[in-house]
Image (cartoon, rainbow, N blue to C red):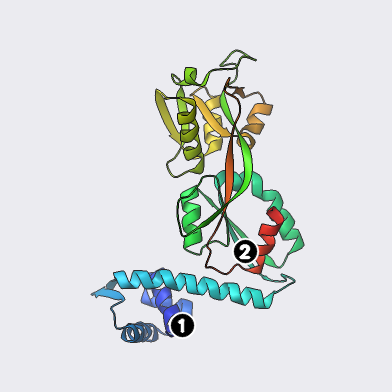
Amino acid sequence: MNLHLLRIFAAVIEQKSFSRAAEVQGVSQPAVSKAVRELEDQLQVVLLERGGRSFRPSEAGQMLYKYARGIFAMERAAIEAVQAYSELERGSLTIGASTTIAAYWLPKYIAEFSSQHPGVSLRLLSGNTKQVAQWLLDCDVDVALVEGHIDDERLEIRPWRRERMLIVAAAKAFPAGRKQRATDLSSQLWLLREPGSGSRSVVEHEMERLGIQPARTLEAGSNEIIVQMAAAGLGLGLVPELAAADAIALGRVQVVELVEGEISRELFRLRLPRRPVSQGALAFEAMIG
């Protein structure tokens, strides 16, 4: 397969336009059209379904585009490895992480890495666990760290850290120094992350383990919002200790301790087994341990 033709085809899909693809690739629009036709002829399959001035990728085109992204990710990794084999004098590194990891765990590591390798361009993407896993599968990120477990045989999943989780409520919502039984908290409104979040799956698992059956729930898009809502007296939230640390220190929320003991969760590192790992990703993974 001609990689030049494949690159032009991928640009057409990404830009959703033959003319914009031509600009990105630095060729004429007729050359883009010709390249797509040649690729279709080579593969003997329709890649773009055309209708008037519009088009959309066929099922075969969608499949080829997924493989193309992987091929070009491997190409970038190879180029970076050759250009900066040992010194990491240049290159790029994209890190994908669940929101809490991105906000509280990674800044110190990114600062240290940037100081050691100033020539490497860094990018941090944050989202929920499912989003980060998909970014890795799509080769959009080089390093992936998530808060929840992912059941996907395409991914290699390794434990990375364990962090403490706290139940937070409005200040003075419960008697100070008195531990609560988990089942007694079922009558409370519980503040939950959105479906797909690693925090959400951990909270649901712990609720089931502890026998908590919330009478009402309210969803929020981040642990920080949950902490603020708990401080306002809306309900209880089970959040990472780091996400609640400032509010606890300021006395805005109260930590609700359980008779059943402390709660913690595992954080994970994801890898795509068949994808070559760039030197930048290897160096960053070695740094974070």
Amino acid type, label 1: Leu
**Horizontal and vertical percent position of residue 205:** 47, 35
> Between marks 1 and 2, how big is the CA–CA gap?
24 Å
Which of the 4 image quarters holds residue 110? bottom right
In the displayed structure, 40 sits above or below 92; it is: below
Amino acid type, label 2: Leu
Q: Is residue 121 left or right of residue 260?
A: right
Circle number at residue 18: none
- Taking the spot 66% from the left edge, 58% from the top edge, the residue there is 285
Badge 2: residue crowd in 10 Å (few <14, some 14–19, many ≥20):
many
Residue 20 in view, yes or no: no
Does label 1 or label 2 sit earlier along the sequence? 1
Q: Given the current orientation, which residue lies at the most extreme left position? A: 51
Q: Is residue 135 left or right of residue 85?
A: left
- Taking the spot 48% from the left edge, 82% from the top edge, the residue there is 26
- Taking the spot 42% from the left edge, 79% from the top edge, the residue there is 6
* Image quarter of the N terminus: bottom left
**Horizontal and vertical percent position of residue 127:** 51, 49
278 or 272: nearer the viewer: 272
- Taking the spot 51% from the left edge, 39% from the top edge, the residue there is 199
Which of the 4 image quarters holds residue 14? bottom left
| Element at label 1 | helix
| Element at label 2 | strand
Which of the 4 image quarters holds residue 196? top left
Task: Give the number of callouts.
Answer: 2
Residue 45 in view, yes or no: yes
Circle number at residue 3: 1
Judging by the rendered image, the residue that carries numbered circle 2 is 93
